[in-house]
Image (spheres, rainbow, N blue to C red):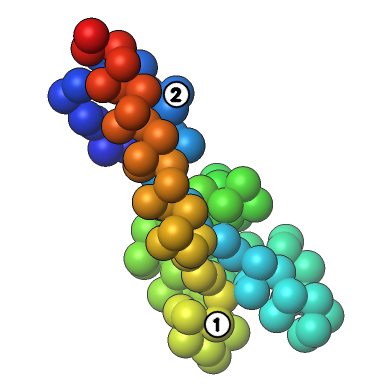
Amino acid sequence: MRSFPYTKGNTKEIKAFMVSVSYNKLWKMLNTRNLSRTELKEKSGISFNVLARMGKNESVSLESLEKICVYLKCNIGEVMDFPSCVQCQEQLSFLNDKCNREKD
């Protein structure tokens, strides 16, 4: 997790700012291909922990994404995407304002 010097160790708000990833494209692809998440795990060689993190839309290693893409014969953009930059900018503005108020 990225740390900001002016947060005074309060990382709860920073987690909200972190650019999150979405694997909704992957889940739709699995559904279309009639594959379960367990089959994906076993046949692609990813761990249960990677699958669990993906289920919570958390980041995973590029190596894990590569294994998935090789198994599914697809590109990385077909299994994941990122939220809009507008949403990230709004969250950053909110955090900056909040941190500035705490400094005063």
Residue 28's spot in the image, x, y percent? 73, 75
Q: Secondary structure at mark 1?
A: helix
**What residue did someone put label 2 on?**
12
| Residue furthest top in the image | 104
- Hey, which quadrant is residue 33 in on the image? bottom right
Q: In screen coordinates, is 55 left or right of 53?
A: right
Q: In screen coordinates, is 63 left or right of 87?
A: left
**What is the quadrant of the C terminus in the image?**
top left
- Hey, which quadrant is residue 42 in on the image? bottom right
Residue 22 vs 12, above or below: the answer is: below
Q: How many marks?
A: 2
The kind of residue on which mark 2 rests is Lys
Q: Residue at x 61, y 47 (%)?
A: 56
**What is the quadrant of the N terminus in the image?**
top left
**What residue did someone put label 1 on?**
78
The label number, if any, that marks residue 17 in the structure image: none
Q: Residue at x 36, y 66 (%)?
A: 63
Residue 53 vs 42, above or below: the answer is: above
Q: Secondary structure at mark 2?
A: helix
Residue placed most toward the observer, 17 or 72: 17
Residue placed most toward the observer, 23 or 33: 23
Closer to us: mark 1 or mark 2?
2
